[in-house]
Image (cartoon, coloured by chain):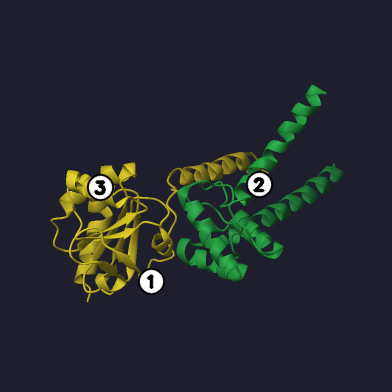
Chain colours: A yellow, B green
Amino acid sequence: MKIRFLLPLIFFILIGLLLWRGLSLHPNEIPSPLIGKASPTFSLPTLLGTKATITEKDLKGHVTLLNVWATWCYACALEHEYLMELASHKDFKLFGFNYKDDNIAARHWLKEHGNPYEIIAVDVTGTTAIDWGVYGTPETFLIDKNSIIRYKQIGPITQEVWEKTLRPLVEKLENEA
Amino acid sequence: MKKAFLTLFFLLIPLQLVFAVEDEYHFNTEAARQQFEGLTTELRCLVCQNQNLAESNAALAVDLRTQIYQKVLSGQSSPEIVDYLVKRYGDFILYRPPFKLQTLGLWLGPFVCLIFGLFYLIFYIKNQRRR
């Protein structure tokens, strides 16, 4: 019969655990079903440079970070500075994915703030982005040498994200065949 | 009389909102319109997660509505269209999650609670009688 007095306490602890768990959940970060799958096929014009189009074939043979950004996206501007720092990294290629943006504004923005990207795909309508499951900017896909999507970073890449999550993954993928 | 008109006006506001969205999309058949309506109310907007695709005005919701509209027009079935979106955005886009291992608690949890409640009730009543 003693257990009767313990029941409210047990109930309290269970509810407490449930709510405590809720604190560390991020309902805005929707897990991508594309992880572990080959990158979607696409063909998009580029923003700058001599190469006119970019396709999924351009992802082969190297570790790629594909960064979805736009000039209208506030968090992308915050991320940009750190991307400039990462651009000197030789272990991977940083590709840009300009999402539902204005070409002129995008070019102007890069001229002003610097261009960390090796090549930039332009998706004005956002149709290709749907194939990638993009739902908010910035998002960054980590793609291995065989163009398999291995990780998706939702939200800006900060130093913390890079050191704790992305860098170990990039190094691991770099050592894969 | 004035009051009656005012009431009528406020009653019609929600209707106006509904038609505002509908007007953007034209369908040749009633079945296609209903299919589109069914899909956009059953699918979640990923930007504002408490709204469905029909209600949301987020840019992505508009894009997804357009995609669904074109697919409905081209004669794709609802399961095909849902599958297309789930492949890209995951089960999260569904307001009605599928029944699988991960969602077992979600689907069966309420029934487990109900059974526990019933057992407790029976236990409680029997105890009371004994006294």
Question: Looking at the picture, does residue B21 appear above or below residue B37?
Answer: above
* Marked residue chain, label 3: A
Disc 1 marks which amino acid?
A: Lys
Is B111 placed left or right of A82 in the picture? right
Work out which residue is located at the far top of the displayed protein and give it: B2
Q: CA distance from mark 3 to mark 2?
A: 47 Å
| Of the image marks 1 and 3, the number of the one nearer the N terminus | 1
Callouts 1 and 2 on one subunit: no
Q: Is residue A2 visible?
A: no
* Marked residue chain, label 2: B
**Dot 1 alpha-carbon crowd within 10 angstroms: few under 14, some 14 to 19, many 20 or more:** few
**Tag 1 residue:** A37
Q: CA distance from mark 1 to mark 3?
A: 26 Å
Q: CA distance from mark 1 to mark 2?
A: 40 Å
Residues at marks 1 and 3 touching, judged by CB atoms closer than 8 Å: no
Q: Secondary structure at mark 3?
A: helix
Residues at marks 3 and 2 touching, judged by CB atoms closer than 8 Å: no
Q: Which mark is residue A160?
A: 3
**Tag 2 residue:** B19
